[in-house]
Image (tube, rainbow, N blue to C red):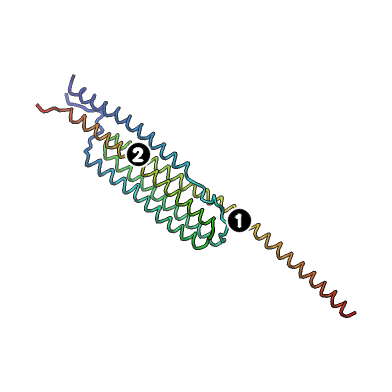
Amino acid sequence: MSLMSFVNDGIDFIGETADELINAATGEIENIIGSAKTAISNLYDGGFVGMSKEGFENLNQKIETYCKSIEEEINKFNEEAKRSEAYAGEISTAVHEYVKAIQGLLTAYVSTMRINQEQAILAFNQFHSSEQKIAQNITQDAQSVTKNAEQIRTGSAKIALE
Amino acid sequence: MALGITKATFGVDENGIQALINDLNTKCITDTKTKMSQGMDGLRDAVNASWQGKSAENFKHNLDSDRKTISEGLEKSFEILKKELFEIANKMGEVDESLIKKR
């Protein structure tokens, strides 16, 4: 066997073994990331009773700031993946696959949080407008009670005058 | 004729791999977990300032549960990457050692 084919055989062996390792690890990582993604909850599962409009607006702002800070981290991962390119192709491939997987997990986390928030805003607005409607009905009821009371008083006065 | 190694894309040592793993651990896992914990403090403060009762408690519980789920996902998957990188490096080392034998 020539030296060149001996060396190339060695390289082929590493390539095949590394591919098997990368495929197996990628599968395991995907399973973990998949389970984590499905476990992300709806934050408002317990409703939002007792929350003021101002408080809700403040929380909404804080959640958006939080989501942006996580997105900044996600973008930083690209730089880390690029750094791995200084290493052998198989090492770099493994790191790139990993970075892609965790970026997917964090993106799902942030997206779910934003979707929850958008749905909660709609629900809160609906809740708030029905609260206002109830308040309007109470005011109308109070006005009609006052009107009736005035009529009774008028009636009493008449009686008294008579 | 010059010797050509057409697919030689590797050349790593264990120290280099360890440095890469440490760097990835800090930048991708530790930093993200720290950012999440700090952000959670701000969210909890916002909830505590304007929201009382069972719903508020449920919300904070859900926030924390998601944070834990994500952190665990990052940690577990990183352990697999770590093992994978060392295994690849070991295979490379084995072949490297057998390429040229001492006489």
* Left or right: B54 in relation to B78: right
Q: Residue B11, percent across and down? A: 22, 35
The quadrant holding residue B85 is top left
- In this view, the residue farthest toward the left is B103
Q: Residue furthest right?
A: A162
User: Which residue is at a point 33% across and 41% down the rendered structure image?
Assistant: B79
Neighbour tally class for label 1: few under 14, some 14-19, many 20 plus, Cα within 10 Å? few
Q: Are marks 1 and 2 in contact (CB under 8 Å)?
A: no
Please give the chain letter of the residue carrying mark 2. Answer: A
Q: Amino acid at mark 1?
A: Asn
Q: Quadrant of the N terminus of chain A?
A: top left
Rendered image: mark on residue A125: 1
Residue on which the image places disc 2: A96
Task: Give the residue at x 49% y 49%.
Answer: A113
Residue B8's quadrant in the figure? top left
Disc 2 marks a residue whose amino acid type is His
Residue A147 lies, in percent from the top left, at 79, 70
